[in-house]
Amino acid sequence: MAAQKINEAHEHIAKAEKCLKTSFTKWKPDYDSAASEYAKAAVAFKNAKQFEQAKDAYVKEAEYHTENKAYPFVWAAAPRSPRGSPSSGLGEAIQYIEKASMMYVENGTPDTAAMALDRAGKLIEPVSVEKAVDLYQKAASVFENEDRLRQAVELLGKASRLLVRLRRLDEAAASIQKEKNMYKEIENYPTCFKKTIAQVLVHLHRSDFVAAEKCVRESYSIPGFSGSEDCAAMEQLLQGYDEQDEDVVNRVCNSPLLKYMDNDYAKLAVTLKVPGGGKKKKPPAAPQGGAGGSQAAAEEDDYEGGLC
């Protein structure tokens, strides 16, 4: 069976090469037919489990579609395992997807470019979170340039969560702020509230109380935030953190409001520690009456007239 498929693949390659030949009566190569034959060859190689040869055939197909200005989506050029998932050639496949996305943008189909980058991000995320962040950010940028803010902000959210996972908290804070601005622009105010919570958690993990407080203060201008459950929780959290009250901080961070956020932010909540080792600040002791007070007053009276 495998040998038969391999022979079939080579037959398609021979036909493709014939399509590329020119003569006195045929001045231009037939790139479209050549690409089609290489696609068939790739499928035959893949069915024979000859993944490296299948990849080479897909790359050839992509090249000839490019020559024909068809700008194919070349993710298929990645070698695949028998179960159909990308194998060790994943990194190479991602390069092809990025190249294809550039072609799509140049060809006036940015939506397809962004979707290709998003798909690439999903594929690479289990292997390289760093690369997934880069791909999601690129996809978001493509949508943003087309004023497709709803699609852009969704991809930006993926990047923000992964930046938190990577503990790149400065970048995460900037990314979440950008998300928040987009949600505000499209008037999705309840999600702005959630982004404020995410900002506060990130800034407190950065030990930047001032930045966290500023985020909440700026959010008062968002319709509906003041007086909301989110606002009350953040005010309590900031007060507890500032006063080093571990009980208050733990109560807020383990509340359903924070506990059921996206997993990366929920982890920030449950691992948040107050400064100073979590010792609650004690209020200054009030003056006490009774024997102690009378004794102090008596001692004062002894020296009222001076020492001599």
Image (cartoon, grey):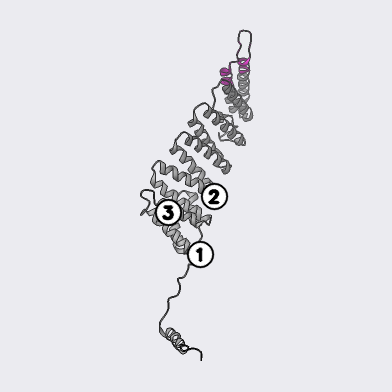
Give the amino acid type for the residue marked by disc 2 in the picture: Asp
What's the mark number on residue 214? none
Give the amino acid type for the residue marked by disc 3 in the picture: Arg
What's the mark number on residue 170? 2
Specify the quadrant that holds the N terminus.
Answer: top right
Lower sequence index among marks 2 and 3: 2
What's the mark number on residue 217? 3
Q: Which residue is mark 1?
A: 278
The residue under the point 41% across, 44% down is: 184
| Percent coordinates x, y for residue 159 in the rendering | 51, 43
Magenta-colored span: 14-37
| Percent coordinates x, y for residue 79 in the rendering | 60, 32
Q: Nearer the viewer, mark 2 or mark 3?
A: 3
The secondary structure type at the circle numbered 1 is helix
Give the amino acid type for the residue marked by disc 1 in the picture: Gly
Q: CA distance from mark 2 to mark 3?
A: 20 Å
